[in-house]
Image (cartoon, rainbow, N blue to C red):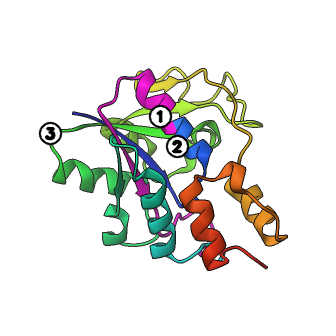
Amino acid sequence: MKTGLFFGTFNPVHKSHLIVAEYLAQWQNLDEVWLVVTPHNPHKDKAGLLDDTERLHMVELATADIPHFQVSTIEFELPQPNYTVDTLAALQAAHPDRTFFLLMGADNFLSLPRWKDPEGILRAAQLLVYPRPGAEIPSDHPLLGHARVAIADGPLMERSATAIRAKLGLKGSANDELPRSVAAYIEARQHYRS
């Protein structure tokens, strides 16, 4: 079973997350994609995150009608902050029948050499990297050309969770950028409103 893992704080989950995950899944013929909701990314300030259970619920809403997408709470059960290499080890132990592929944007790939045990990550999963605006991968990137790294050539997505939160904070609408069920949930709960 070829399983894609798409990690994120999903604060909030938006259409580009789903489009990128689907693109990479089709590109590499993955059987399924797990969206791994991260309670605490060590590279981000937890204070700016919506409550873990709220973000998890929005990802569940966003993926409810996509049969080959599942939501994983594995990082809720692990020590925080969450390190990808540790999560991959836990997933491999729990699911030895699966081959894991780590789905990420080029912005994360650029910083990957500074993550905890990048070689351990590459031993545990093949990386599928999607382009991001403003995240050009230089020819001297230490992991470019690695046998376990594949760089996709897909359309650039301009959406970002940061920009969506800013728009919502200004009482604007981000309905075009969010799955319908997520937009309705955010509106009902008045999340991200200043």
Task: Determine which quarter of the picture holds residue 101.
Answer: top left
Mark with earlier residue (2, 3): 2
> Position of 123 compared to 46: left or right?
left
> Position of 181 compared to 102: left or right?
right
Q: What is the CA distance from the residue labelled 2 to the residue labelled 3?
A: 25 Å
Q: Amino acid at mark 1?
A: Glu
Q: Position of residue 191 (x, y in %)?
A: 65, 75
* 23 part of magenta stretch: yes
Residue placed at 34% from the left, 57% from the top? 72
Question: Can residue 45 be seen from the camera position used here?
Answer: no
Residue placed at 69% from the left, 50% from the top? 177
Q: What is the CA distance from the residue labelled 2 to the residue labelled 1?
A: 6 Å
Q: Is residue 123 above or below residue 59?
A: above
Q: Which residue is mark 2?
A: 18
Residue placed at 54% from the left, 65% from the top? 42
- Label 3 neighbourhood size at 10 Å, few (<14), some (14-19), many (20+)? few
Label placed on residue 22: 1
- Image quadrant holding the N terminus, namely top left
Q: Is residue 158 above or below residue 42?
A: above
* 93 part of magenta stretch: no
Residue placed at 61% from the left, 43% from the top? 16
Q: How many marks?
A: 3
Q: Which residue is mark 3?
A: 97
Q: Amino acid at mark 2?
A: Leu
Q: Is residue 13 above or below residue 76?
A: above
Q: What is the CA distance from the residue labelled 3 to the residue labelled 1?
A: 22 Å
Q: Amino acid at mark 3?
A: Asp
- Label 1 neighbourhood size at 10 Å, few (<14), some (14-19), many (20+)? some
Extent of the magenta region:
21-47
Instruction: Out of 137 and 176, give the one closest to the viewer.
Output: 176
